[in-house]
């Protein structure tokens, strides 16, 4: 989960309430107006064909300010809204964007284009699944604005969004705590974006614990094609294992999947105030999933060598409660009392309430709980809708997370010992 710490560091800030309208910046420098029809007739030239109108945006967004964050000007906000709209419209239509007119630095523009291209690559990964968007809305919660000595303005924000995928009519797929950093520069043609960083798995690997304000633009652009190829290869490997059977081990007491999922849905985009929140100390994903299992009737297990406890004043919280790696060690090694599960089950045998661990070849970084199955026309599972914490998600496709390594842990129930 260390790659998610950077996102989590911004989670404790309160949201403000200043909202501004969406505007578009002036056109790029050097643009020339087409001749009018009367001018064309006088010159003997054919009348110009009217340029096709841009499609009406499928969604919209707002900017809100935390207490103490200085509001941006209308021109600065317009530059950010123009980027966000262009990015979501590209995702909606699954067409790679051209950000050149929005940026003052074209290396940075290409890096942001690569980030959207990576997401489009993931959204077109599964044949027969339509991950285009029919609608979207976003809110950028600005935690700080910084006026730099060179005249540029930095804005750091956490995004909350709702995306409506064509594959799931009527379903709101929610995503929260998605970190953005914009640096804005005033040019002769108005405010433009000098640089933009949106946290994702590839950025996390390039940063490798370093300063997120570092310049990773060219490195990201260079690394993206190979990383997308790696994600495609991982998907192909999962597909090659399709059809493998899975038999859950017997358990004395069943897992209450309905109760676990009710809790998961309630707290995917928020936090239960009765529990500690580890969002800014390593990530809250396993802590959240452990709470879901407890809500599903799996009891804490303080017995033996493999333990899973949260601490109640009489005993300490075990590492397995909030660490993805240590939870897997507990789930694999537990005998006697407590959790009964199947670790490393065939990927497409999951059910709502089961868990998916995510990471890289170097280790596990994230865990989510399955909320529903995504099936093809024949009823075969091709993806999962999941709930998660830290990068908060609700009813969101698992395949869009962008980790190269996935593993399924099926939950059977628990033994009385």
Image (spheres, rainbow, N blue to C red):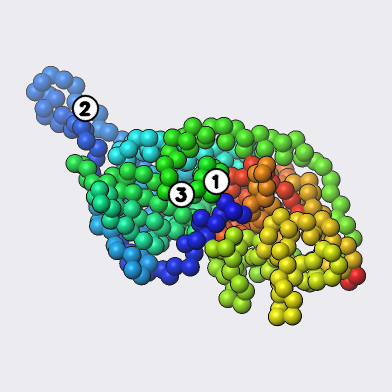
Q: Is residue 271 left or right of residue 75?
A: right
Alpha-carbon neighbours of circle 3 within 10 Å: few (<14), some, or many (≥20)? Answer: some
Give the mark nearest the N terminus, 2 or 1.
2
Q: Residue at x 58, y 69 (%)?
A: 277
Q: Is residue 345 left or right of residue 385?
A: right
Alpha carbon of mark 2 to alpha carbon of mark 3: how far?
48 Å
- Residue 89, given in percent of the width and then of the height, sits at 42, 44
Q: Residue at x 35, y 55 (%)?
A: 155
The residue carrying mark 3 is 212
Alpha-carbon neighbours of circle 2 within 10 Å: few (<14), some, or many (≥20)? Answer: few
- Residue 148, given in percent of the width and then of the height, sits at 28, 53
The answer to whether residue 264 of the structure is visible from this angle is yes
> Quick check: marks 2 and 1 in contact, CB under 8 Å?
no
Asked which quadrant contains residue 49, the reply is top left
> Quick check: marks 2 and 3 in contact, CB under 8 Å?
no
Q: Residue at x 62, y 38 (%)?
A: 231
Asked which quadrant contains residue 123, the reply is top right
Residue situated furthest left in the rendering: 42
- Residue 67, given in percent of the width and then of the height, sits at 36, 70
Where 276 sits versus 388, above or below? below
- Residue 110, given in percent of the width and then of the height, sits at 40, 35
The residue carrying mark 1 is 208
Eye-nearest disc, 2 or 1 = 1
Where 287 sits versus 235, above or below? below
> Quick check: marks 1 and 3 in contact, CB under 8 Å?
no
Eye-nearest disc, 2 or 3 = 3
Q: Residue at x 38, y 35 (%)?
A: 107
Give the mark nearest the N terminus, 2 or 3.
2
Alpha carbon of mark 1 to alpha carbon of mark 3: how far?
9 Å
- In the image, which disc is placed on residue 48? 2
| Element on which disc 2 rests | loop
Alpha-carbon neighbours of circle 1 within 10 Å: few (<14), some, or many (≥20)? Answer: few
């Amino acid at each position: 989960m260390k790659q998610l710490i950077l996102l989590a560091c911004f989670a404790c800030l309160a949201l403000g309430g200043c909202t501004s309208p969406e505007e578009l910046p002036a056109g790029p420098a050097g643009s020339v107006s087409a001749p009018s029809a009367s001018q064309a007739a006088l010159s003997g030239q054919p009348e110009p064909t009217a340029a096709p109108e841009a499609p009406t945006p499928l969604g919209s967004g707002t900017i809100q300010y935390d207490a103490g964050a200085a509001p941006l000007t209308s021109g600065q906000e317009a530059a950010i809204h123009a980027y966000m709209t262009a990015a979501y419209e590209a995702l909606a239509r699954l067409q790679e964007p051209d950000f050149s007119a929005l940026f003052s630095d074209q290396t940075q523009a290409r890096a942001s284009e690569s980030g959207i291209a990576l997401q489009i690559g993931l959204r077109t990964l599964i044949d027969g699944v339509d991950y285009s968007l029919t609608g979207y809305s976003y809110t950028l919660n600005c935690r700080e604005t910084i006026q730099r000595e060179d005249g540029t303005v930095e804005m750091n924000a956490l995004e909350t969004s709702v995306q409506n995928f064509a594959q799931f009519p009527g379903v709101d797929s929610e995503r929260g705590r998605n970190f953005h950093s914009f640096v804005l520069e005033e040019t002769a043609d108005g405010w433009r974006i000098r640089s933009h960083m949106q946290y994702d798995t590839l950025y996390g690997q390039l940063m490798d614990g370093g300063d997120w304000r570092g310049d990773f633009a060219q490195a990201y652009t260079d690394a993206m094609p190979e990383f997308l190829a790696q994600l495609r290869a991982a998907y192909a490997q999962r597909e090659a294992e399709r059809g493998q059977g899975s038999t859950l081990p017997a358990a004395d007491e069943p897992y209450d999947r309905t109760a676990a999922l009710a809790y998961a849905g309630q707290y995917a985009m928020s936090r239960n105030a009765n529990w500690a929140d580890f969002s800014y100390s390593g990530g809250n994903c396993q802590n959240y999933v452990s709470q879901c299992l407890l809500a599903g009737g799996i009891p804490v297990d303080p017995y033996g060598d493999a333990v899973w406890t949260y601490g109640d004043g009489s005993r300490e919280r075990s590492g397995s409660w909030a660490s993805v790696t240590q939870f897997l060690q507990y789930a694999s090694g537990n005998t006697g009392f407590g959790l009964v599960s199947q670790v490393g089950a065939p990927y497409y045998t999951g059910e709502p309430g089961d868990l998916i661990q995510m990471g890289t070849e170097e280790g596990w970084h994230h865990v989510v709980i399955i909320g529903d199955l995504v099936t093809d026309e024949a009823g075969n599972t091709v993806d999962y809708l999941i709930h998660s914490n830290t990068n908060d998600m609700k009813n969101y496709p698992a395949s869009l997370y962008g980790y190269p390594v996935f593993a399924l842990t099926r939950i059977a129930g628990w033994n009385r010992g």
